[in-house]
Structures are given as C-alpha cells and as structure tokens.
Image: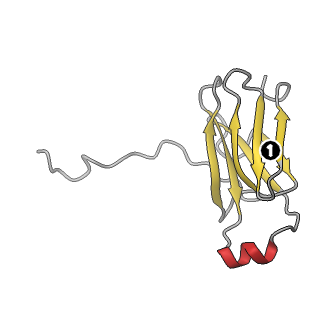
Amino acid sequence: GAHDKGENELKELRTFNDIVYSKNMSLAAIDWHPVHTGMLAVAPVRNLTFDERVALSGQAVDSYILIWDFVDLIHPQLKLESPQELQCFKFNASQPHLVVAGTANGQVILWDIKAPVA
C-alpha cells in the first residue's frame, strides 16, 4: 500500500571520500560539471566552531577542490589547491574548463583545467 516501509526511502547511488583531503570534513560547496556527465566537484573544509575560525583567521591553510568522476570512486580525478580555505566555487557554464572559487579571506581564485579534464 501507500504506507509500505521503504516506499519513501532514497537509494544511495555513489559515495566519494578521499581519506587524505576530505575525511571527517564538511563540504563548503558542491557543483556538477556542466559538460561531463558523472563528474562533480566538492570543496572540503575543516569542522571548526565559529570561535576556532576567528582564532585561526588570517592563517594560511591549504584547501582543495576535489573533482570526482563516477568511474573512480576512491581517487579524485583532479585536485585544485588553494592557499586559503574555500567558501564557494563554481564551474563556468559556457567555458567549463574554468573554475572560480572564493576563499575565507576574500581572495578569488581562477583555475583553467582544460588539459587535465579534456
């Protein structure tokens, strides 16, 4: 019937987790690649309280955008490195080889990933 157990449950399709760059971290942002089906990117960030973030503000900390392809669930296809923690990022819809991100200190970073994801 309409109330059978499991009717409203969602099935997990894919799980991505890099044990070095995203384990036990939150995701500040996630975006689908605008052209490559089955490819997405995430920006892991440290799990810190507001007070911890204030105390550490201004300190450089390596941060990454991990680009995943559904064909390899264990290793990201590409890592984009940032000298500051990332707050957001987005693929350019009309030029999908360009990725732009904003950092915790207000810096804007642009990557050209044309060669690695061709």
The secondary structure type at the circle numbered 1 is strand
Q: Residue furthest front?
A: 106
How are the colours assigned in the image?
A: secondary structure
Total numbered labels placed on residues in the image:
1
Pick the quarter of the image with the C terminus: top right
Give the residue at x 81% y 45%. 108
Q: Which of 78 and 98 is in front in this view?
A: 98
Residue 114 placement: quadrant: top right
Q: Position of residue 106 (x, y in %)?
A: 79, 53
Q: Position of residue 2 (x, y in %)?
A: 13, 45
Amino acid type at mark 1 = Lys
Residue 41 placement: quadrant: top right
Q: In this view, does 58 lie to the left or right of 26?
A: right
Q: Where is residue 78 in the image (x, y as percent from the top left)?
A: 78, 39
Q: Which of 8 and 50 is in front in this view?
A: 50
Q: Is 40 placed above or below 66 here?
A: above
Residue count near mark 1 (Cα–Cα under 10 Å), binned few <14, some 14–19, many ≥20: some
